[in-house]
Image (cartoon, helix red, strand yellow):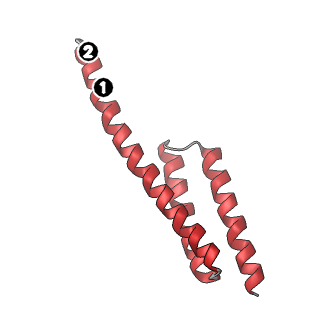
Amino acid sequence: MANIKSQIKRNKQNEGRHERNKAVRSALKTSTKKARSAVAEGDADAALTQVREASRELDKAASKGVLHKRTAARRKSRLAKAANRVGTSAQ
């Protein structure tokens, strides 16, 4: 345990950020799973809605620094690609 006041404060801040980041990452996984399951079901409208929601959450996470911006972009791209495959096969 730290004896220095500033280090004690820093440890508390890091703990809080860690918890918040963990919650955001968990929410990202959930929204991505929902999007992927909607794509797997083949429902184009539901897939589009879920992918849009997941993309929004990925953007938020990237802007807050929870994810790297290129990681968020890559995940969004993969979700969009999967949703587009469902959309084109439905028509």
Residue 77 horizontal/vertical position (percent): 69, 59
Residue picked out by circle 1:
11
Count of numbered labels shown in the rendering: 2
First in sequence: mark 2 or mark 1?
A: 2
**Residue at left 61%, top 79%?**
41
Q: Is residue 31 left or right of residue 7?
A: right
Residue 28 horizontal/vertical position (percent): 49, 56
Residue picked out by circle 2:
2
**Residue at left 56%, top 75%?**
49
Observer-nearest residue: 4 or 22?
Answer: 22
Residue 55 horizontal/vertical position (percent): 57, 62
Mark 2 secondary-structure assignment: loop
**Residue at left 52%, top 68%?**
34
Quick one: label 1, few (<14), some, or many (20+) residues within 10 Å? some
Q: Of all residues shown, which one is farthest toward the bottom? A: 91
Is residue 72 placed above or below 42 in the rendered structure?
A: above
